[in-house]
Image (tube, rainbow, N blue to C red):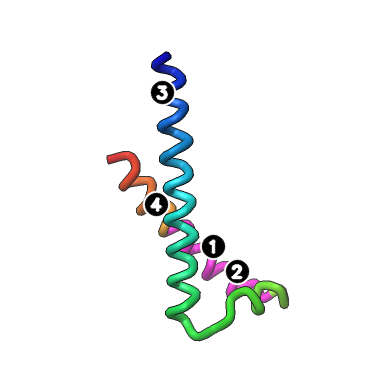
Amino acid sequence: MKLLDDLGLSIAFGLVGIIIMVIGYLIFDKIIPADFNKELEKGNVAVAIVVAGFLIGIAIIVSRVVAA
């Protein structure tokens, strides 16, 4: 039973982390005047690196919050 409880908590915290990352990306997209989606569709590697770095940074913060 403890295994199922731990699995359920892991799934819940994972979903919370993903939701927080999506919200963070949307806020980042609204603050910065560039259209990231359009640039990514054009294949702009520099924008892809910036977005990836931002998402990694948010993921590190979320993982620390979830682990606490």
At label 3, which amino acid type do we have? Answer: Asp
Q: Which of marks 3 and 4 is in front?
A: 3
Instruction: Look at label 2 and name its amino acid.
Output: Ala
Q: Residue at x 45, y 62 (%)?
A: 23
Q: Give the range drawn in magenta.
A: 44-57
Which label sits in the foreground, 1 or 3?
Answer: 3
Q: Where is residue 37 in the image (x, y as percent from the top left)?
A: 63, 74
Classify mark 1: residues with Cα within 10 Å, few (<14), some (14-19) or many (20+). Answer: few
User: What kind of residue is marked 4?
Assistant: Ile
Figure quadrant of the C terminus: top left
Residue 52, magenta (yes or no): yes
Asked which secondary structure carries label 1, the reply is helix
In percent of width and height, residue 26 lies at 48, 69
Q: Which residue is drawn at 47% across and 78% down?
A: 30
User: Which residue does the numbered mark 3 point to in the structure image?
Assistant: 5
Residue sitting at x 39%, y 51%: 60
Tell me whether circle 1 and circle 3 mark residues in contact (CB < 8 Å).
Answer: no
- Residue that badge 1 annotates: 52
Q: Does residue 9 sit above or below 49 in this rendering? A: above
Q: In this view, does 13 lie to the left or right of 38?
A: left
For label 4, the SS is: helix
Q: Which mark is residue 48?
A: 2
Estimate how packed mark 2 is, as few (under 14), some (14 to 19) or many (20 or more) residues with alpha carbons within 10 Å.
Answer: some
